[in-house]
Image (cartoon, helix red, strand yellow):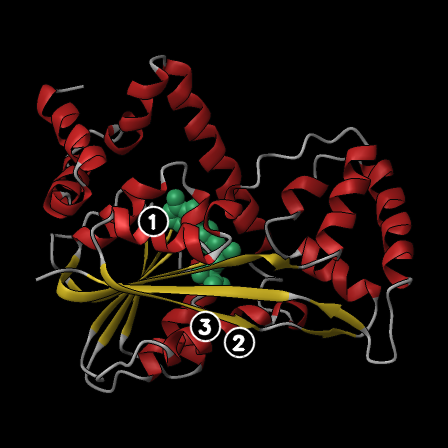
Amino acid sequence: MPRDAVLAFAFVQKSPRASYATAARASGHRSTGQQWLFDGARLTSRSDETGIMDEQQRKATLKQTFDAVSSGYDGGALRFFPQSARSMVSLLDLRGDEHALDVACGTGHASLAVARMLPNGRVTGVDFSAGMLDQARRKAAAQGIGNIDFLERDMTALGFPADSFDVALCAFGIFFVDDLDTQLAHLASVVKPRGKVMISSFQEAHYFHPLREMMLARLRTHAIAIPPPNWKRVGHEGACRALFDRAGLTNTRVETRNVGYYLDCAERWWDVIWNAGFRRLISLLPEDARERFKRDHLKEIEALVTKDGIWLDVGVLYTVGTKPA
Ligand SMILES: C[S@@+](CC[C@H](N)C(=O)[O-])C[C@H]1O[C@@H](n2cnc3c(N)ncnc32)[C@H](O)[C@@H]1O
């Protein structure tokens, strides 16, 4: 790793307040071919090449998962995503002429919701899954929304000049990266001074409770190793606030909303599992075990049916901060 890149990273890590320009320069390094730079920060701490391979493989698996789920992602069982995007936008107080960035935009729920609020502005949506972006572009065209561009990019190396956007969003995406501090600094680096940065994340006590815990417990009986719960790092107000403070963002506000609803039947819970990131876990089961797993799991979920259906609990934290002038 070139010495200036190592120093740039040390600076990003140690001095978040002064890190915006540095993080942007770092992404510039990547765009000139030194692709390992952002991951390189982690490589130095892991101090072997396996760190990079693990990271690249993990990203490749994530991409594959989101490509695979993209066609079912906008199905009704996952309607909390667009619902949450609308909540997010309502908390942003947009003027209408901003240039907004939506990072890890997926099929464009937040991008499209923001674009509708910007008669004189634009949205740039970024994701690394070509499948998710195809859906986003298709919806924008179908809805006649023209003030929007979708780009295939890794959020750890955005490649935009510093101070490009008035506002940057990341809905249910930031927890996919290892290093939250570096990622938030990177996001803030491409926002103009006095611009806003906003993330949404699942609230620990209300993240598909208790359906998710039941699914994980049953997966463990099949000897599936459950990866560490990365989303929990931003699963409560204190963690979100501390993350924004460390990035040097100011006027931080954390709002909580529950965007849950009743599912008609247990099969709809399977739609939630199968059309989002959980598919990766289920895919670890051999095919015959998968059928058995589904049958047994849905039977236990069926026991939760009330006269209204099965409650899908979705507590969401919206954290917004301002980049200092
Ligand atoms: C749970 S989805 C959320 C999508 C969208 N923001 C929403 O609210 O519906 C997470 C998205 O993050 C994307 N993602 C994960 N890691 C990424 C990375 N390193 N760079 C770009 N996109 C990434 C995935 O492809 C996926 O579309």
Residue on which disc 3 sits: 85
Using the image, determine if residue 220 lies above or below residue 89. Answer: above
- Number of labels in the image equals 3
Res. 115 mark: none
Residue 49 location, quadrant:
top left
Kind of residue at badge 2: Gln
Tell me the distance, in whole angstroms, between the alpha carbons under discs 2 and 1.
Answer: 25 Å
Spot occupied by residue 282 in the image (x, y as percentages of width and height)? 72, 42
Element on which disc 1 rests: helix
Looking at the image, is 69 positioned above or below residue 314?
Answer: above
Secondary structure at numbered mark 3: helix
Identify which residue is drawn at 41% across, 73% down.
88
The residue carrying mark 3 has its beta carbon less than 8 Å from ligand 1: yes
Disc 3 and disc 1: Cα gap in Å? 21 Å
How many residues crowd mark 3 within 10 Å: few (<14), some (14–19), many (20+)? many
Disc marking residue 243:
1
Amino acid, disc 3: Ala
Q: Residue at x 29, y 72 (%)?
A: 148
Is the C-beta separation of discs 3 and 1 under 8 Å? no
